[in-house]
Amino acid sequence: MFTETQTLALAKQILSEPSITPDDKNCQKIIAERLQKIGFTIEEMNFGQTKNIWARLGNTAPVVCFAGHTDVVPTGDVSRWAFDPFTPTEHDGKLYARGAADMKTAIACFITACERFVAANPNFSGSLALLITSDEEGDAHDGTVKVVEKLKERNELIDYCIVGEPTAMNQLGDTLKNGRRGSLSGSLTVHGKQGHIAYPHLANNPIHAAAPALAELAATQWDTGNAYFPATSFQISNINGGTGATNVIPANVNVKFNFRFSTEQTEGSLKTRVHEILDKYGFEYDLAWSLSGNPFLTEAGKLTQVAQNAIDEICGVAAELSTSGGTSDGRFIKVIAKELIELGFVNATIHQIDEHIAVDDIPKLSAIYEKMMIELLK
């Protein structure tokens, strides 16, 4: 059942393109040509240096959409790779290439799943769609978020979305993401007065002033999470202050921190509470905020059940639902998608030297996607 080679061949073709973010090279051209052959309409939505395509077959609901990205992170020191990162290579049952796991091969899996599904069901009810960007690994300013804005403007919505991010922990299918935490960062600058360290009464040390407030922020329990999310976490990532000399009290100290937050919180609730804590200590400060994404969640329902059933049938694995990990483009798509999950390859080597996946997993993931189409569009 799992001896088909079309998916592997297509994956290698896409993986051969050195599409370091946000440069797509020829990836989306390869994808578009393949989809056009089975009747998809391809709409290019390019912004700045970012290439995006919205591909659709059908004009009725429900809409089953696959979302993914053709851009990859830089390779690092190529000399440390066992094989050239843009010459996809099979070795000991593994496929090595930058983007093998994250996430070009998943795109190939969905395309071949579409080809088989359409061939077997030429008059299927509903629509198939793909939303592909070249700006997921970068700033993500001109990619999926812009396409979603356009789709929302014309009320073109998605019923079921599958994001092909690598989600498995130890074996294909053991984990799928039904949500992600939000990410909110802050850059706090506490102002003091510079002076000689031997005369502290003539200066005002901003590090000393900030320390009790930082300790309280670090000790605060923001919430206890819920059935789908762990508790919200606060972490300080950088503290910078001083002139480099040991005898100078600095004028300012800058502290960078990040929240990974659950649906128990909002951007506004976190900001309000942080300011309440800081204001208690009476020092002068500036605080700049940056929201990378709000938390999103698809509660257990039809899409999660269809995915779990397909995984069980193909892999014999009971897939767990998870909201762990970083952010993904799912945070943008959920605005127009009723239900959304992330389901892809094992993530053990993503962004690493010698990124790879098991070759045997490739036709299995394509078969999982096909079975999901059958169930969602029957």
Image (tube, rainbow, N blue to C red):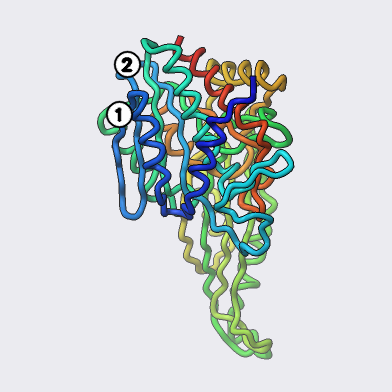
x 54%, y 42%: residue: 12
Numbered tag placed on residue 287 in the rendering = none
Residue type at tag 1: Thr
The image quarter in which residue 346 lies: top right
Q: Secondary structure at mark 1?
A: strand
- Name the residue carrying label 1: 41
Q: In the image shown, does 78 or 92 lie closer to the viewer?
A: 92
Q: Does 374 appear above or below 291?
A: above
Q: In the image shown, does 166 or 113 lie closer to the viewer?
A: 113
Marks 2 and 1 close (CB-CB < 8 Å): no
Q: Does 206 appear above or below 165?
A: below
Q: In the image shown, does 204 or 72 lie closer to the viewer?
A: 72
Sequence-wise first label, 2 or 1 = 1
Residue 39 seen in render: yes
- Name the residue carrying label 2: 60
The image quarter in which residue 168 lies: top right
Q: Is residue 271 left or right of residue 319?
A: left
x 62%, y 42%: residue: 325
Percent x, y of residue 301: 55, 17
Percent x, y of residue 288: 46, 60
Q: Is residue 239 left or right of residue 288?
A: right
Q: Does 192 appear above or below 373?
A: below
Q: Secondary structure at mark 2?
A: loop
- Residue at the extreme left of the image, as rendered: 154
Dot 2 surroundings within 10 Å: few (below 14), some, or many (20 or more)? few
